[in-house]
Amino acid sequence: MSTLARNRVPSLNTGVYDRLKGMIAGRKIEPGTRLVQQTLAKQLGTSAMPVIEALRRLERDGLVVHVPHLGSFVRESTVEDLQELYCIRRGLEGEACRLFVQKATAAEKRELADLNDQLNDLAREGEIEQFLETDLKFHMHIVRCARAGRLMEIMESRHIEERIFTNAPELQGIGASAAHLVGMHDAIVRAVMNGNESEAAEALREHLLEAERMYLEAVGDIRKRMK
């Protein structure tokens, strides 16, 4: 195999992985869907091998499950999964926020404050979908600028798991009024700008506790209406 061909293989595999991951996160492929390698290869305009490798990586990420003799399926998340996910996020993102205060540049800290301003504006305007997208950028900015590669890799997958769950049509806009969303990240940014590591980490953990409470409240409201 030529040097050019060898260099192209990881790039192609990564591209297929990223595209499939994005389709799962955006629920273009619904939870529980069987992932047929030949169908995906045709849809993505590639051969079977990059799809096989992508499915293996997605299984390691916890986004796909392989059932012997049946194939691979998009993982279906439960409320219990969401609670466990937030528990993981509180521990790891709290540490990421502490590292962010230590390692982020002044420009990166200003960017976090700018993202928070955007979040508050979107909340006041009632733009829930854009708010959620910007919220993801806010949290991943903290994780990336913590400069801990393995932590970033783990958290990226955890954020995608949350998006799959919360992008369910029945949960859109439920239990998350604009009034609840304004100022949700203010304490985090305030502690970061003051250079207080422990306070920033605690503020982020408290924020995630509140976010979990809101989603669980939303699920409870849905279940009441179904009775």
Image (cartoon, rainbow, N blue to C red):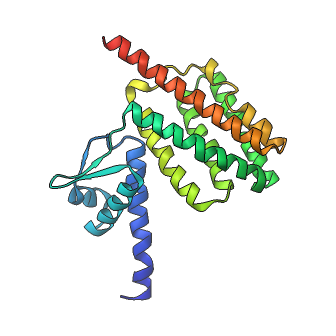
- Tell how many labels: 0
Percent across and percent down for residue 74 are 31, 46
Percent across and percent down for residue 55 are 32, 58
Q: Residue furthest right?
A: 194
Q: Residue at x 39, y 67 (%)?
A: 13
In the rendered image, is residue 137 in sight? no
Q: Is residue 26 left or right of residue 99?
A: left
Quarter occupied by the C terminus: top left
In the rendered image, is residue 10 in sight? yes
Quarter occupied by the N terminus: bottom left
Q: Residue at x 77, y 53 (%)?
A: 102
Q: Is residue 85 above or below residue 170?
A: below
Percent across and percent down for residue 119 are 66, 33
Q: Residue at x 59, y 47 (%)?
A: 92
Front position in the image: 141 or 219: 219
Percent across and percent down for residue 125 are 63, 23
Q: Is residue 145 above or below residue 26?
A: below
Q: Residue furthest bottom?
A: 2
Q: Is residue 107 left or right of residue 127?
A: right
Q: Quadrant of residue 146?
A: bottom right
Q: Residue at x 51, y 44 (%)?
A: 159
Q: Is residue 119 above or below residue 24?
A: above
Front position in the image: 185 or 12: 185
Q: Quadrant of residue 136?
A: top right
Q: Quadrant of residue 68?
A: bottom left
